[in-house]
Amino acid sequence: MIKFFRKIRYGLMEKNKTGKYLKYAIGEIILVMIGILLALQVNDWNEQRKDRIREQAVLKQLQEDYQANLAQLEEKMTTRERIIFSAMKSLNAFDQPDGVIRDSLVKELANVFHDPTYDPIQNDLTSSGNLILIRNPKLKRLLSNWSSDVVGVREIEQNWTKAVYEQFGLILSEIGLGRDIYNSFMNDSRHLWLLDHNEESFKAEIGTSKLGAPLDEILTSRKLEAILGSAIILNKGANLQSEALRSRILEILNLIKAEIKTDD
C-alpha cells in the first residue's frame, strides 16, 4: 500500500503537477494521522477491556473476602452478647445471692472470661495499585476507608482483652477460682473463634480445685463485681462499634454485587 502511494506521488512529481502533488501529500498525511488515531483508539479500547477483566476478578475476590469478614464479625458480636448476658447474671447473683448455685455461677464467670478480637482479611488494593481499577467512586471510597473503620472496633476490644489478662485473671486467682474457671472455660463455654469450628478439640479436663473459694466469698469480692461491670460496658461498646462496621460491610457487599457482571 505504501509503495502504491509512493508511485502516485512520484508520477505527479515527474509530470510537474505541483498543486496536485501538494493536495495529494496533505491527503496522505491526513490518512496516516487517521490511521494512527484509529490504532491508538483500538489500543485504548483493548487496555480498557483488560482493565474491566481485572476489575471483575478484583471484585469477586473482594466479595469473598468481605463475606468472610462479615461472618467473623457476627461471630465476635455473638460472643460479646454472651459475655454481657453472663456478666449480668453474675451481677444479679451478687444482688440476690439466695438460691445461687456455685457451679452455675462458675460457668457464667467462665463465659465472661472470653475476649473476642476481630481480625478481618486486609486487602492490599492501595499498595497493589488495584484500587484504581474500581470504577464506582462510592465503593472505592469505602474500600479506602476500611482499615480506619476497623480501628474503631479494635481499640475498644483491646481494652477488654487487657482487662481480662491483667485484671480478671488475677482476681480469679486471688479468690481461688482460677482452676475452676479455666476448666469450665474449656469444657462448658462456646468457642466460635476456632477456625475449624471443632469445639470438641479444645476441650481438656483439668478438674476443679479442692481449694476453691466458697460461694459467699465469691459473692463478696468487690474486685470481681467491678470487673463484671467493666465486661458489660466494654463489650457493649465494642458491639455498638461492630454494628456500625457490619452496616459498612453490608453496604460494600451490595455495591460489589451491583458491579459484578453475571453470565446471564
Image: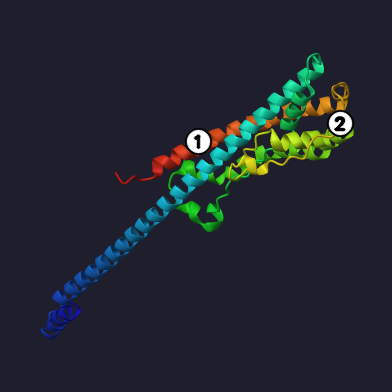
Q: Which sits earlier in the primary sequence, circle 2 or circle 1? A: 2
Q: Amino acid at mark 2?
A: Gly
Residue positioned 79% across, 40% down in the render: 165
Q: Give coordinates of residue 259: x percent, y percent.
A: 40, 43
Residue at the disc numbered 1: 250
The chosen color scheme is: rainbow
- Count of number-bearing discs: 2
Q: Give coordinates of residue 54: x percent, y percent.
A: 41, 55
Position of residue 15 relative to residue 138, above or below, is: below
Residue at the disc numbered 2: 212
Which numbered dot is residue 264? none
Residue at the limit of the structure toward the bottom, as seen here:
14
Query: Between 30 and 119, which is closer to the camera in this rendering?
Result: 119
Residue 9 placement, left or right of 213: left
Label 1 neighbourhood size at 10 Å, few (<14), some (14-19), many (20+)? some
Q: Quadrant of residue 100?
A: top right
Q: Give coordinates of residue 235: x percent, y percent.
A: 70, 31
Position of residue 139 relative to residue 235, above or below, is: below
Residue positioned 14% across, 75% down in the render: 20
Q: Amino acid at mark 1?
A: Leu
Residue at the limit of the structure toward the left, as seen here:
15
Query: Between 217 and 64, which is closer to the camera in this rendering?
Result: 217
Query: Between 98 and 127, which is closer to the camera in this rendering?
Result: 98
Q: Quadrant of the N terminus?
A: bottom left
The alpha-carbon separation of the residues under discs 2 and 1 comes to 47 Å
Residue positioned 23% across, 68% down in the render: 30
Q: Nearer the viewer, mark 2 or mark 1?
A: 2
Residue 180 seen in the figure: yes
Residue 10 placement, left or right of 127: left
Residue positioned 65% across, 33% down in the render: 79
Residue 241 seen in the figure: no
